[in-house]
């Protein structure tokens, strides 16, 4: 599995005119990997 840093995701969204409403930790990948679910709007 390939991951993207949380800071890179948020910077990309904001750079492209999106607004992050919430970021929630997502444990669907198990406890070994950090995963997040992003809620946003444009």
Image (spheres, rainbow, N blue to C red):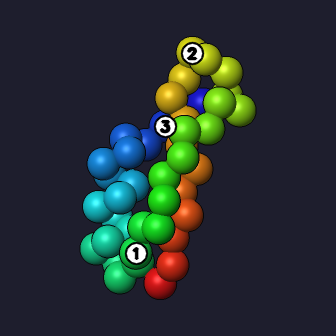
Q: Secondary structure at mark 1?
A: strand
Mark 3, Cα crowd under 10 Å, few <14 / some 14-19 / many 20+, is: few
Q: Is residue 26 visible?
A: yes
**Cα gap from disc 3 to disc 1, whole angstroms:** 21 Å
Q: Which residue is mark 2?
A: 32
Sequence-first tag of 2 and 1: 1
Q: Give the numbered dot on residue 19.
A: 1
**CA distance separating discs 2 and 1:** 29 Å
Q: Earlier in the sequence, mark 3 or mark 2?
A: 3
Q: Quadrant of the N terminus?
A: top right
Residue that carries the numbered disc 3 in the rendered image: 3
Pick whichever, 20 or 32, lies toward us. 20
**Label 2 SS:** loop
Determine the residue positioned at 35% across, 78% down: 16
For the residue pair 20 and 9, the one nearer the viewer reads as 20
Residue at (51, 29) in percent of width and height: 34
Q: Position of residue 17 (x, y in %)?
A: 35, 82
Residue 42 x, y percent position in the rendering = 47, 84
Is the Cβ of the residue at disc 3 closer than 8 Å to that at disc 2?
A: no
Asked if labels 1 and 2 touch by Cβ distance under 8 angstroms, the answer is no
Q: Earlier in the sequence, mark 3 or mark 1?
A: 3
Distance from the alpha carbon under mark 3 to that under mark 2: 13 Å
Please state which of the two labelled residues, at mark 3 or mark 1, is closer to the viewer.
1
Q: Secondary structure at mark 3?
A: loop
Looking at the rendered image, the disc whose residue lies closer to the viewer, 3 or 2, is 2
């Amino acid at each position: 599995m390939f991951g993207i840093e949380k800071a890179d995701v948020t910077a990309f969204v904001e750079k492209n005119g999106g607004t992050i409403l919430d970021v929630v930790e997502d444990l669907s990948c198990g406890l070994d990997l950090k995963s997040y679910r992003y809620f946003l709007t444009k």
